[in-house]
Amino acid sequence: MRNRLDSISETLLMGPGPSAVPSEVYAALARPTLGHMDPSFIAIMDEIKELLRIVMGTRNPLTIPVSGTGSAGMEAAFVNLVEPGDRVLVAVNGAFGQRMVDVASRLGAEVETLAFDWGTPVDPDAVADRLRTATFNMVGVVHAETSTGVRNPVAEIGALVRESGALYLVDAVTSLGGMPVEVDAWGIDALYSGTQKCLSCPPGLAPLTFSERAVKRLGARTRKVPNWYLDLGLLVDYWQGGTRTYHHTAPVNMLYGLYRALQLVVGEGLDAVYARHREAHALLVEGLEGMGLEMLVAPEWRLPMLNAVRVPDGVDEAAVRRALLDEERIEIGGGLGSLAGKVWRIGLMGHAARPGNVTRVLGSLEGRLRGLRGTSDATRYQRPSRSWKRYEISL
């Protein structure tokens, strides 16, 4: 029988996720599986919670990884905190803000959106104006909008939400581990993320934290949480306390991987990790602009770990991506929604945010664009900036 795993070759993952995984995390994933109630495994669970609190900037006791990808984290936040008829305000400036709207609507919430152009940030003044004229149970926003590369002003919005009395929900799937996240200082009541972005762990877990206010809201529900698997009222008995109660069989080896990934981030130092992402971003932008390419987002609102690049007229963006993947084993992403076919999304996430990887992407993309023939834009790529070529290629 043919084993297709034997044909898998290493790919430089420089798209919107998943991201490159360091060898230390692969090694952790391969450790012997323990029972999910084994005391040695429970000790690892407890350390994971402490490491997550460091990276999230919180002291919340209810801080755990949910079994599932980042979307499971989003679902867990909503199903535990929203009941039918609750009023939810979501600031939408990309695909993942819109997904928040979808999830809340399915729970019977009365959802209102504040919409902003894709590629631009949420305007805190618009949020303030709406909160002055209406009352909401929850306000949601995406910190790092992966579909556009926009950083939203989460701290400023948090101050406004706290004054209104609403719970504040933040999507940090792409930002956690790659830029500052300060749950307590920013007044965030519920925050979820994913392991497959800047934490450089394979997809499969969703770090989640609830504030004391969120826990009280959960305890005051008038209906059961409409999802047994994601019911935090049940999950906490497995993740907390001297005696643990079985809920579901935890993905033991995935939790090994997260444990090691968090150790690597904390061991490097959060400030150093964030600086590394910023430096890789600056190098990438320098090289792209040297080729005559344009960034989608204004400099002050750009994410360091997700870079949206405008596709020039006449260029088949999907064909360029296919060639990079098939011929050079480099993966970058295309646009979503209204940006489909209009942007490339280049990720600099976690372990991949290193100068050598930026150099490799720039060199390969330059070669593809210089090879264009028969388009009015082909001459734009003949004299790109070369300052980024001083770095050696390394994964």
Image (cartoon, rainbow, N blue to C red):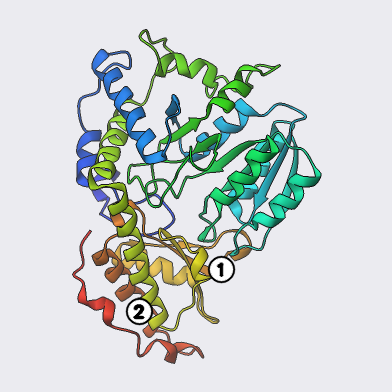
N-terminal-most mark, 1 or 2: 1
Q: Residue 375 got which mark?
A: none
Query: Label 2 sits on what residue type?
Result: Glu
Residue 318's spot in the image, x, y percent? 48, 68
Q: Is residue 3 visible?
A: no
The residue at which mark 2 appears reads as: 366
Q: Quadrant of residue 202?
A: top left
* Residue at the image point whose x is 31% and y is 48% from the top: 270
The reply, left or right, for residue 193 in relation to residue 32 is right
Q: Which residue is mark 1?
A: 341
Instruction: Please tell me how crowded label 1 is: few (under 14), some (14-19), or many (20+) other residues with Cα within 10 Å.
Output: some
Q: Is residue 27 left or right of residue 109?
A: left
Rendering coords of residue 34 (x, y %): 25, 19
- SS class, disc 2: helix
**Among all residues in the image, which is located at the extreme top?**
243
For this view, does 217 lie left or right of residue 151? right
From the viewer's perspective, is residue 127 above or below residue 186?
below
- As shown in the figure, which amino acid type bears the numbered disc 1? Gly
Q: How many marks?
A: 2
**Image quadrant occupied by the N terminus:** top left
Percent position of residue 97, x then y: 61, 49
**Which residue occupies the foreground of this view, 273 or 108?**
273
Q: What residue is at 29 percent from the left and 27 percent from the top? A: 47
Q: Residues within 10 Å of mark 2 (few under 14, many from 20)?
A: some
Residue drawn at (67%, 43%), measured in percent from left and top?
101
SS for callout 1: loop
| Of 135 and 98, the residue lying toward us | 135
* Residue under the point 28% across and 83% down: 386
Residue extending farthest right: 133
